[in-house]
């Protein structure tokens, strides 16, 4: 006598061990891709934040120059401007007077700092800057003299055309990355055709490296 097995059309065969391993491997690869892209997106977002401040800072310095017919820095820093060469890069720290000159001192009730000259006697606010959090990305000092730092807690650096030739020295010539300093397709020019150039050391906090955030390059 034959025994007939009943066929269940709704029954589903289980996954084999190999199939499970394949699925887990695929999920792991996809998760790795997502994480790497998320990390890159976060890095790009931070860089964009710094680039925005650099752009605003450059506009503010230019507006100050139009208003006062001079650069917003202490005169002592420009003492070598008559040598025919531009002065060295000026940091946005509390010693140069640059940041204080771009802010309205009436907002803080300050007078430019102890023993310092008020570089903004008309009390014009050329830029809005947030207070830094944990010493990063903003004004470190709530009162003048002000210090402005980037996302990594270091000041920005400003190149100014102090010899009047409408250009500044190009830091890319000393960049440690050969794709920038020795690019055969698009080599860096000796001079940047601009009166104001600004840069940040970037995440590695080291000058003249690939991750510097600069005003004259898109990358």
Image (cartoon, helix red, strand yellow):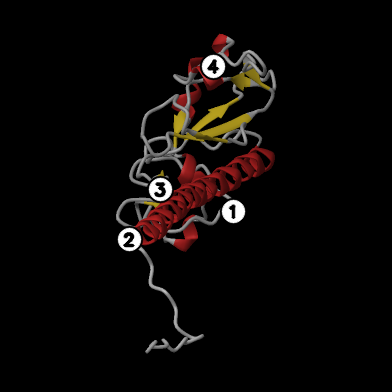
Q: Is residue 197 left or right of residue 41?
A: right
Q: What SS does tag 3 mark?
A: loop
- Which is more toward the observer, 145 or 189? 189
Task: Give the mark, 2 or 3, whose residue is nearer the N terminus.
Answer: 2
- Numbered label attached to residue 17: 2
Q: Residue furthest top?
A: 83
**Residue 76 figure quarter:** top left
Residue 161: image location, x then y, percent: 61, 24
Where is mark 1, residue-wise? 124
- Numbered label attached to residue 151: 3
What residue is rendered at 66% in x and 19% in y?
A: 186
In the picture, the quarter occupied by the C terminus is: top right
**Decide: marks 1, 4 in contact (CB < 8 A)?**
no
Task: Give the mark, 3 or 4, whose residue is nearer the N terminus.
Answer: 3
- Which is more toward the observer, 175 or 32? 32
Q: Give the Cα separation between the discs numbered 3 and 1.
A: 26 Å
Q: Give the Cα separation between the discs numbered 1 and 4.
A: 39 Å
Mark 3 burial class by Cα count in 10 Å: few <14, some 14-19, many 20+? some
Where is mark 4, residue-wise? 181
Q: Give the Cα separation between the discs numbered 3 and 4.
A: 25 Å
**Residue 63 figure quarter:** top right
- Indicate whether 15 appears above or below 22: below
């Amino acid at each position: 006598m034959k025994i007939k097995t009943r066929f269940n059309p709704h029954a589903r065969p289980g996954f084999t061990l190999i199939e499970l391993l394949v699925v887990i491997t695929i999920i792991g690869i996809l998760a790795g891709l997502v994480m790497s892209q998320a990390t890159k997106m976060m890095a790009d977002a931070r860089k964009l934040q710094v680039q925005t401040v650099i752009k605003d800072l450059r506009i503010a310095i230019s507006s100050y120059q139009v208003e006062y017919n001079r650069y917003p820095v202490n005169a002592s820093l420009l003492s070598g401007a008559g040598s025919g060469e531009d002065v060295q890069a000026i940091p946005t720290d509390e010693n140069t007077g640059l940041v204080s000159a771009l802010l309205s001192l009436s907002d803080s009730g300050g007078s430019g700092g102890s023993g310092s000259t008020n570089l903004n006697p008309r009390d014009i606010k050329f830029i809005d800057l947030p207070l830094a959090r944990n010493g990063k990305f903003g004004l470190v000092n709530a009162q003048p003299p002000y210090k402005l730092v980037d996302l990594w807690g270091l000041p920005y650096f400003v190149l100014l055309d102090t010899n009047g030739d409408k250009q500044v020295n190009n830091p890319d010539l000393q960049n440690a990355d050969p794709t920038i300093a020795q690019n055969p397709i698009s080599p860096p020019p000796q001079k940047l055709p601009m009166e104001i150039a600004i840069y940040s050391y970037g995440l590695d906090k080291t000058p003249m490296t690939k991750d510097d955030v600069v005003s004259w390059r898109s990358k």
